[in-house]
Structures are given as structure tokens and as C-alpha cells.
């Protein structure tokens, strides 16, 4: 018995490599699910969430430490573009726009305020 190929490409038998690929993906998903379940069993219930500790939030005892680190972060060229730094500091770290502008002003040695005043005159 000879196998004949159909003219329609969709009716041809699938290659076995796709089955192998799907089995690899499912094994990886099962392993990731197992690790997550194990982490939850061990008490790591916040492993997938990110939040700032209360002492580093606005009004916290160590907020100034966050603001000082934000100035260093803004000055460092290895952390990406300025818009990416702004997005990270405002959305992830929890800085307000005013705090961000204060940090940016400190990072530029007063250049932000000086530029704003120069533009108004």
C-alpha cells in the first residue's frame, strides 16, 4: 500500500516534531505549576506580586532612603531611557509625580527648576 499525498496542504499528515514540541511545552508548564504550588505551600503567597513595604511608602519612616536611591537610579545610564526610568519609579516604586520631579531636579543639580524658570521669562 502506497501513501498518496493530498493536493490540499491542510489534509496532509502533520509532522511528529509538533507533537514533540507540544510535549516539551506541557512539561515546562507542569514544572512551573508545580514550583508555584510548592512555593504557596511553603508560605510564599506574595511571590508573584510586587508591592512596596509600608516603611518605604509615602509617609513611611524610610521614604527618604527611597528618594535618595531614586536620584542615583535616574543618574545611572545603565538602567535605560529616561521614560523607562520615569515609568518604573512612578508605577512600580510608587513615587508621586511631584516626588519624581524633585528627584529629577536633585539629579540635575537644579537644572529642571532652572529650565522651567528660564522658559517663563
Image: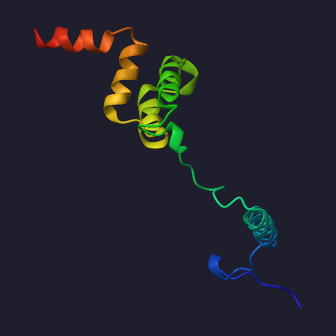
Q: Is residue 118 left or right of residue 85?
A: left
Q: Is residue 87 above or below residue 22?
A: above
| Residue toward you, 24 or 116 | 116
Residue 32, x across and y down, in percent? 75, 63
Q: Is residue 110 above or below residue 99?
A: above
The colour scheme is rainbow
Q: Nearer the viewer, residue 18 or 107?
A: 107
How many numbered marks have been drawn onto this rendered protein structure? 0
Quadrant where the C terminus sits is top left
Front residue of 2 and 120: 120
Percent position of residue 117, x then y: 18, 11
In the figure, residue 6 lies in which quadrant?
bottom right
Looking at the image, the residue that sits furthest to the bottom is: 1
59 vs 43, left or right, is left
Residue at position x 35%, y 16% from top? 105
Q: Residue at x 58, y 22 (%)?
A: 78
Residue at the (31%, 30%) spot, across then down: 98
Horizontal and vertical percent position of residue 96: 35, 36
Position above or below: 14 against 113: below
Q: At 16% from the left edge and 12% from the top edge, which residue is drawn?
A: 119
Looking at the image, residue 100 sits to the left or right of residue 66; the answer is left
Find the residue positioned furthest to the right: 1
Query: Which residue reaches farthest front?
Result: 61
Quadrant in which the N terminus appears: bottom right
Amino acid at each position: 500500500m502506497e501513501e498518496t499525498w493530498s493536493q490540499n496542504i491542510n489534509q496532509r499528515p502533520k509532522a511528529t516534531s509538533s507533537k514533540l514540541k507540544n510535549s516539551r511545552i506541557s512539561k515546562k508548564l507542569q514544572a512551573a505549576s508545580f514550583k508555584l504550588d510548592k512555593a504557596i505551600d511553603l508560605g510564599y503567597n506574595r511571590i508573584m506580586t510586587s508591592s512596596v513595604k509600608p516603611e518605604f511608602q509615602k509617609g513611611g519612616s524610610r521614604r527618604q532612603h527611597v528618594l535618595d536611591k531614586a536620584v542615583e537610579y535616574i543618574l545611572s545610564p545603565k538602567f535605560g531611557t529616561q521614560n523607562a526610568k520615569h515609568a518604573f519609579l512612578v508605577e512600580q516604586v510608587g513615587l508621586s509625580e511631584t516626588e519624581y520631579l524633585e528627584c529629577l531636579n536633585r539629579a540635575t543639580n537644579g537644572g529642571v527648576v532652572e529650565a522651567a524658570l528660564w522658559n517663563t521669562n
